[in-house]
Image (cartoon, grey):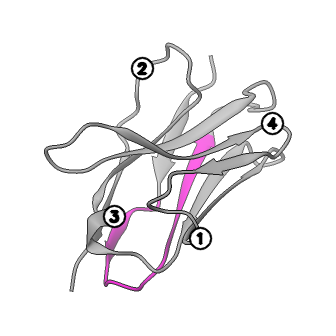
Amino acid sequence: QVQLVESGGGLVQPGGSLRLSCAGSGSILNLNFMGWYRQPPGNQRELVAEITSGGSTNYADSVKGRFTIFRDNTKNTVYLQMNRLKPEDTAVYYCHDGSKRPWGQGTQVTVSS
């Protein structure tokens, strides 16, 4: 099974940008669905963006117009470009393919001045 590892989080000021990466240990071509999820402190995990192998995307209303999900199958990586970040975007971000695989460790994003 391809392992997925998240990276790219950090501390950023409101209005700033970050790009998260979800790197597969092998080919992600067979992963038709890939999603970025987040879990804010004290809250449940939620899906914020998803992409299919064909490139179709969908976003949560809270991030629409600010976040962009895209995948580079040649690099076995799915990205989440996050612009105009807000304090309420603070969370641990995870990537997952919707299967029964365990969740990874995620990457912390903190938006604060």
- Name the residue beneath numbered marker 3: 89
Instruction: Say which of 113 and 3 sits in front.
Output: 113
Sequence-wise first label, 1 or 2: 1
Q: What is the spatial separation of the Cα atoms under label 3 and label 4, in whole angstroms?
A: 26 Å
Q: Which mark is residue 80?
A: none
Q: Are marks 3 and 1 in contact (CB under 8 Å)?
A: no
Q: Amino acid at mark 3?
A: Asp
Residue type at the position of mark 4: Ser
Residue at 51% across, 51% down: 60
Q: Residue furthest front?
A: 61
Q: Could you tell which of marks 2 and 3 lies nearer the N-terminus? A: 3
Q: Which of the two discs, 3 and 1, labels the residue nearer the N terminus?
A: 1
- Name the residue located 34 percent from the left edge and 68 percent from the top edge: 10
First-in-chain label (4 vs 2): 4
**Where does the C terminus fall, quadrant-wise?**
bottom left
Residue in front for this viewpoint, 99 or 107: 99
Nearer the viewer's eye, disc 3 or disc 1?
Answer: 1
Q: Which residue is mark 1?
A: 65
